[in-house]
């Protein structure tokens, strides 16, 4: 999309005059302030002159925000439990977008793009990154989350059993007792039926028997 827009729309970069050095309007501006369409470049760098005509929109800003948006959603989907601290993932997401913004602003300060080129590129990159992650890669629908109650796999992860509630997102933990929880009788419900008033009417497939909890040695995964 970046190349299509550059070669169909084009637009001169802010430093085009210094690279091209046109025969009209370079040393002196016309007094009638007419829009110059016929000119010849006196510059010797043909490649740089060609690049100076491809300003819209910023490919650096577009790619930077695409990477930031996609990786932010990917980390949120794949890391089902926080690593070491719950601030790690938000911090990584913040620095991803901070780096993308730094790249975008540098394109303006280096006179490589106009501000509108950077703005359109940032919006396009972020939008494509979200669409690719949510609807094409489907990072939230296709993720594989291992059983969160396994106490033997806690490296770098905040133990789920330190929480007082069960995680029933997308059916994870359904009918699985949280054996190490402070509340020994906490189970994850398969479904919650809501009545007309908006409150819970019944909990299906919920077991609240302490005897079954202590005698059962096998967990059934659905």
Image (tube, rainbow, N blue to C red):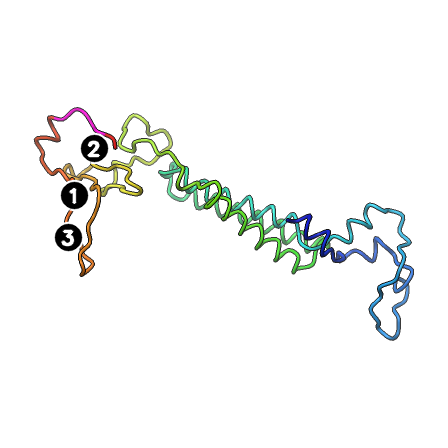
Q: Quadrant of the C terminus?
A: top left
Q: Is residue 185 left or right of residue 125?
A: left
**CA gap, disc 3 and disc 2:** 28 Å
User: In terms of secondary structure, what is the magenta stretch mainly?
Assistant: loop
- Whichever of labels 3 and 2 marks the residue nearer the N terminus, that label is 2
**CA gap, disc 2 and disc 1:** 23 Å
The disc label shown at residue 90, or none: none
Q: Nearer the viewer, residue 62 or 198?
A: 198
Residue 186 image-quadrant placement: top left
**Residue 210 placement (x, y as % from top left):** 9, 34
Q: Nearer the viewer, mark 3 or mark 2?
A: 3
Q: Is residue 16 left or right of residue 105?
A: right
Q: Nearer the viewer, residue 91 or 68?
A: 68
Residue under label 3, please give it: 201
Q: Nearer the viewer, mark 2 or mark 1?
A: 1
Q: Which residue is rendered at x = 66% and y = 57% of the image?
A: 117
- Whichever of labels 2 and 1 marks the residue nearer the N terminus, that label is 2
Residue under label 2, please give it: 180
């Amino acid at each position: 999309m970046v190349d299509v827009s550059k070669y169909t729309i084009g637009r001169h970069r802010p430093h085009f005059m210094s690279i091209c050095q046109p025969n009209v309007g370079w040393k002196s501006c016309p007094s009638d302030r007419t829009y110059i369409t016929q000119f010849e470049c006196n510059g010797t760098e043909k490649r740089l002159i060609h690049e100076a005509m491809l300003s819209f929109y910023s490919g650096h800003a577009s790619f930077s925000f695409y990477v930031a948006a996609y990786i932010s959603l990917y980390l949120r989907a794949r890391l089902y439990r926080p690593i070491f601290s719950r601030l790690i993932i938000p911090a990584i997401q913040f620095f991803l977008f901070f780096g993308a913004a730094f790249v975008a602003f540098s394109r303006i300060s280096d006179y490589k793009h106009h501000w509108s080129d950077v703005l359109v590129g940032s919006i396009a990159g972020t939008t494509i990154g979200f669409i690719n992650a949510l609807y094409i890669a489907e990072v939230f629908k296709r993720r594989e989350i291992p059983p969160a109650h396994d106490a033997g796999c806690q490296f770098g992860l905040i133990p789920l059993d330190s929480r007082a509630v069960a995680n029933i997102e997308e059916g994870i933990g359904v009918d699985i007792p949280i054996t190490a929880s402070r509340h020994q009788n906490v189970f994850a419900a398969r479904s919650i039926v809501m009545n007309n008033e908006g409150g819970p009417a019944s909990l299906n497939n919920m077991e609240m028997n302490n005897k079954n909890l202590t005698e059962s040695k096998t967990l059934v995964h659905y």
